Amino acid sequence: MQPADRNDHPHADRFSRMPAPACFHRKTVDGSSAGGGGGRAGDLCVSQLYLSLIAFLLLHSVPALPPVRAGIIATIGRKTYLALYSTISTLLLAWVFHAALNTPYVELWEPAGSHAMVTLVFAPLGMFLVLAGLFSPNPTSITFRHDGRPGAIVAITRHPVLWGFLFWSGGHLIANGDLRSLILFGGLGLFSAAGFLMLDKRAKRRMNDCWPIFRDAHPLLPLAVIATRKNHLRIDAPMALAFALTAGLTLWLLFGGHALLFGADPLIMVTM
């Protein structure tokens, strides 16, 4: 399969109206580079993508170690630590996406409208789970609120943010069909899946004897406890806020926002 620049792709006008970044290039059959920024520039962009992903992984792995986390909090305080951690995490994630958008396009499979439909289902679902998880009290997972009664979303799954990123990244991976998307969304998806084990291990150590009770009442698999009627589905304020924000963001992304940010129109892709 011959690598191709996305703007040279037969469906380029459907995917993007944006000009290709300088490091985009197309390789000929003999391996030489044609157009764009050439082989060295393309290799530099790929290296930057790997480097940004490694930095993002290290940020979410090293500070998670109890001695490291405790030492940092003891030095600068919990609130400062959380604010600094969130800021750096956001900046690194922006770097990851910037590097991915500037990485040469190498097609792995032909994107189709049915693939884009998967994204239209999984991306909003993932966005909702991430927002609901961040807004809801949760003693065992990623959230802005660690105190108080566990939120309603925690009755659906104890790791809503991780599931949200997994659904979101999986949906985007299927719809794009190129190497850079496999590296970006596949890497984020695998990192989210690994987070299940890491956060459960941390919660078990922190909660001690209370962990089995919490684990049985708050499942890992979405809706597992509710399906067995061990728990009841309820809606609280964080879930309602997350739903409203998800609806608004989804509409904005569908009707121009996604094309503005990433140069791809989801509604056009569905009709392919």
Image: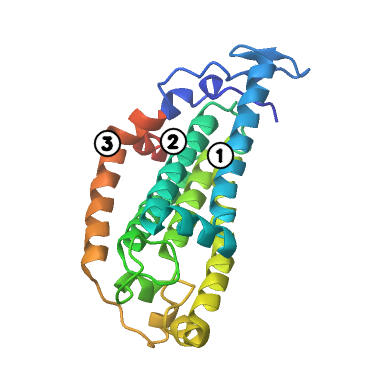
Q: Which residue is mark 2?
A: 272
User: Looking at the image, is 57 positioned above or below residue 132?
Assistant: above
Above or below for 120 versus 6: below
Q: CA distance from mark 2 to mark 1?
A: 19 Å
Q: Residue at x 57, y 37 (%)?
A: 52
Res. 122 visible in picture = no
The answer to whether residue 242 is left or right of residue 33 is: left
Residue mark closest to the camera, 2 vs 3: 3
Dot 3 lies on which element? helix
Q: Which residue is mark 1?
A: 181
Which quarter of the figure is the N terminus placed in? top right
Q: Which residue is mark 3?
A: 255
Q: Is residue 5 visible?
A: yes
Q: Are marks 3 and 1 in contact (CB under 8 Å)?
A: no
Q: Residue furthest right?
A: 30
Amino acid at the residue labelled 2:
Met
Give the x, y percent position of residue 216: 47, 85
Assign a secondary structure to mark 2. Answer: loop
| Residue sitting farthest toward the top | 35
Q: Amino acid at mark 3?
A: Phe
Tag 2–tag 1 contact (CB < 8 Å): no
On screen, residue 73 versus residue 79, left or right, reads: right
Specify which label sits upstream in the sequence, 2 or 1: 1
**Disc 3 or disc 1, which is closer to the eye?**
1
Crowd rating for badge 3 (residues with CA inside 10 Å; few <14, some 14–19, many 20+):
some
Q: Amino acid at mark 1?
A: Ser
Q: Quadrant of the C terminus?
A: top left
Q: Nearer the viewer, residue 260 or 99?
A: 99
User: Which of the marked residues, 3 or 1, is nearer the chain's N terminus?
Assistant: 1
